C-alpha cells in the first residue's frame, strides 16, 4: 500500500489544484477579515452608540457558529431570500465573516491594553483622532496583535475544509475524492497534511519577518 | 458510504438538516421549482456527490460513475438544459429541500424518515446489506460464524438502524453481534478490516462488490445481512410532475437496455427485478 501505487500524477495534480483553492480562499478571507476586524474593534473601542451593542452580538453569534453551518446557511439561505450567490463567493463570505469576529476580539484586546497616557500626550499636541490611531496606536498595536492574528490565520486555514460542504474542492476534499476512488485514504491525506504544514510554515515565517521588520522600523524612528 | 445515506440523523446530516430547516422556516419563501417553472427557465439543476463510488465519484478530475453516465443520457432525453453541481452529501438533501437544487441525482437510500420530506424515483439499484470479510478468512463461512466477531460500520448510519435484522439472524443460532466499531467513512473501515482490527464490515452489496473488484486480494464478499433496501434519486416532497418526468426517463432507459448495461458496467451485475415504487419498511 505504498503511496506510489495508490496515487497517480492526476491525483497529485488535483491535490495541487486543491492547494491553490485553499490558499486563495483563506488569503481572501484573511485580507477581508483582518482589516474588518480592526474596524469593528476601533468602533467598539470608541464606544460608537448602537454599534457597541451590535458588534459584541455579532462576535458572540459567529464564535458559537461552526464554519460548516455558517457555509450552509449562506449558500442555501441567501438564495431563499432572493440573493443568488455562487459557491466561491459564498465560501469567501463565510470565511471572512468567521475570521472577522475572531480578529475583532484580537484587535480589541490590543486596543484595551494601549497605554492611555500616550493618547493624552498626543491630544495635548493637538493631534486628531485619525492621526493618533494611524501614527501612534496602530504601529504599536499591530506588533502586540501580530502573533495572535497569525495564529487565527492558521486556524482559519485549517478550518477551511468546512467550506467543501458547498461544493468547493479544497485540498481536503481533493484528498477525500482520491481516497474514495482508490479505497486508500491514507496516502492522499498524508500529502494533504504535508501541504497544510507547508502553508502554515510560510505564515509563521511571514510573522517572524514582519516582527523583525517592525523592530528595525522602530530602531530607525 | 451509504451509512450516511441511510439516516437523516448522521452527524453531518444533522447540520445540513438544521440549515435546511432554518432556511425554510425563517424565510418561508424557499420552495422547489415545479416542472413548469423548470421548463420556463430552460434548465434543470441537479446535484451529485463526489465520493460515492461506484455511483458518483471523481477520477482524474472528471465526474464519473453510474449516476453520471445516466446524467449524460438524461441530458439527451430532456428538452431543456441539465446543469450539474457536485457537492458533498452533507449539503445535498438540504439543497433539494430548500429548492437550491431540483434533483438529488444520487443513490439516496429510501427510508421512512426521508420519505417525510422527499419524494423518491423508482429505485436505481439493489442496496441489500452484505458483509465483507478479509480474503481467505476461513473463520467466517456462514452468518452464524459472525457471532462475537468485531464489526466495522459507519457512524450515525442507517446501516446501524438495521443491525437488529442481523441480530435476529444470529439469535437463531444463539449468537450475538460482537464489538461494533464506528467509522466516519467507509474507506477507513475497509482499511482497518485489512489491518485485522475488525473482522467484517457491513455495507450495501454494490459498494462491497466495487471494493472487492478493486482489491480482490484483500477482501471477499460475504452474505446478505438485511432485508430489501433500495436507493433512488430524490426530489422535494410533492414535486409530482418532476418526479413523473424522471420516472419516465428511467422507464425509458430500462426499456431500451441502457439501464441494465450501466448497472452491469458499474455494479458488476444488472438488477432486472427492481420495483417501480418502493415503500420503505425502515
Image (tube, rainbow, N blue to C red):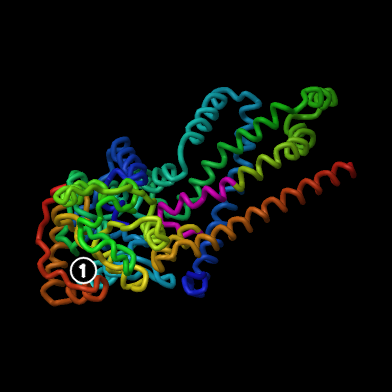
Residue A165 is inside the magenta segment: yes
User: From which residue to which does the magenta span run?
Assistant: A155-171
Q: Residue at x 31, y 73 (%)?
A: B213
* B9 is higher (above) or lower (below) than B252: above
Q: Residue at x 61, y 43 (%)?
A: A152
**Where is residue B191, by image quadrant?**
bottom left
Q: Front-most of A32 and B36? A: A32
* B81 is higher (above) or lower (below) than A35: below
Q: Is residue A110 left or right of residue B106?
A: right
**Where is residue A184, by image quadrant?**
bottom left
- Residue B182 image offset from top left, x and y in percent: 36, 49
- Residue A85 image offset from top left, x and y in percent: 41, 51
Secondary structure of the residue carrying tag 1 is loop
Q: Residue at x 76, y 48 (%)?
A: A210
Chain bearing mark 1: B
> Secondary structure of the magenta portion, mostly?
helix
Q: Quadrant of the N terminus of chain B?
A: bottom left
- Residue A40 image offset from top left, x and y in percent: 60, 34
Label 1 sits on residue: B78
Residue B153 makes an appearance in the image: no
**Where is residue A190, by image quadrant?**
bottom right
Amino acid at each position: 500500500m505504498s503511496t506510489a501505487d495508490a496515487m497517480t500524477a492526476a491525483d497529485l495534480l488535483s491535490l495541487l489544484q486543491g492547494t491553490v483553492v485553499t490558499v486563495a480562499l483563506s488569503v481572501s478571507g484573511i485580507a477581508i477579515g483582518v482589516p474588518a476586524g480592526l474596524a469593528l474593534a476601533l468602533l467598539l473601542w470608541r464606544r460608537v452608540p448602537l454599534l457597541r451593542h451590535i458588534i459584541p452580538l455579532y462576535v458572540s453569534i459567529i464564535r458559537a457558529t461552526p464554519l460548516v453551518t455558517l457555509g450552509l446557511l449562506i449558500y442555501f439561505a441567501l438564495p431563499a431570500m432572493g440573493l443568488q450567490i455562487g459557491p466561491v463567493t459564498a465560501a469567501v463570505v463565510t470565511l471572512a465573516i468567521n475570521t472577522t469576529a475572531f480578529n475583532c476580539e484580537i484587535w480589541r484586546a490590543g486596543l484595551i491594553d494601549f497605554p492611555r497616557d500616550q493618547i493624552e500626550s498626543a491630544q495635548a499636541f493637538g493631534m486628531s483622532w485619525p492621526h493618533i490611531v494611524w501614527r501612534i496606536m496602530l504601529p504599536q498595536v499591530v506588533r502586540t496583535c501580530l502573533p495572535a492574528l497569525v495564529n487565527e490565520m492558521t486556524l482559519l486555514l485549517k478550518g477551511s475544509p468546512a467550506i467543501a460542504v458547498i461544493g468547493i474542492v479544497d485540498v481536503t476534499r481533493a484528498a477525500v475524492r482520491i481516497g474514495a476512488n482508490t479505497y486508500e485514504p491514507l496516502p492522499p491525506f498524508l500529502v494533504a497534511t504535508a501541504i497544510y504544514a507547508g502553508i502554515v510554515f510560510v505564515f509563521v515565517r511571514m510573522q517572524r519577518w514582519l516582527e523583525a521588520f517592525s523592530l528595525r522600523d522602530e530602531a530607525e524612528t | 458510504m451509504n451509512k450516511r445515506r441511510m439516516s437523516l440523523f448522521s452527524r453531518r446530516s444533522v447540520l445540513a438538516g438544521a440549515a435546511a430547516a432554518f432556511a425554510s422556516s425563517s424565510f418561508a419563501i424557499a420552495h422547489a421549482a415545479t416542472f413548469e417553472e423548470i421548463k420556463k427557465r430552460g434548465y434543470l439543476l441537479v446535484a451529485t456527490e463526489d465520493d460515492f463510488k461506484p455511483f458518483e465519484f471523481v477520477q482524474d478530475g472528471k465526474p464519473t460513475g453510474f449516476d453520471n453516465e445516466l446524467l449524460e443520457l438524461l441530458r439527451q432525453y430532456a428538452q431543456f438544459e441539465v446543469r450539474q453541481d457536485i457537492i458533498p452529501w452533507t449539503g445535498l438533501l438540504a439543497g433539494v429541500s430548500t429548492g437550491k437544487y431540483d434533483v438529488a441525482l444520487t443513490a439516496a437510500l429510501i427510508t421512512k424518515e426521508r420519505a417525510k420530506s422527499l419524494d423518491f424515483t423508482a429505485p436505481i439499484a439493489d442496496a441489500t446489506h452484505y458483509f465483507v470479510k478479509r480474503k481467505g478468512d476461513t473463520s467466517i463461512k456462514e452468518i452464524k460464524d459472525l457471532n462475537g466477531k468485531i464489526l466495522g460500520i459507519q457512524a450515525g448510519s442507517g446501516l446501524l438502524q438495521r443491525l437488529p435484522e442481523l441480530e435476529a439472524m444470529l439469535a437463531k443460532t444463539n449468537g450475538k453481534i460482537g464489538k461494533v466499531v464506528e467509522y466516519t467513512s467507509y474507506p477507513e473501515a475497509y482499511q482497518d478490516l485489512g489491518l485485522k482490527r475488525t473482522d467484517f464490515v457491513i455495507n450495501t452489496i454494490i459498494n462491497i462488490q466495487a471494493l472487492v473488484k478493486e482489491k480482490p486480494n484483500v477482501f471477499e464478499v460475504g452474505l446478505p445481512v438485511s432485508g430489501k433496501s433500495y436507493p433512488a434519486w430524490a426530489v422535494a416532497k410533492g414535486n409530482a410532475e418532476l418526479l413523473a418526468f424522471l420516472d419516465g426517463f428511467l422507464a425509458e432507459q430500462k426499456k431500451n437496455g441502457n439501464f441494465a448495461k450501466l448497472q452491469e458496467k458499474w455494479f458488476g451485475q444488472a438488477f432486472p427485478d427492481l420495483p417501480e415504487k418502493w415503500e420503505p419498511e425502515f
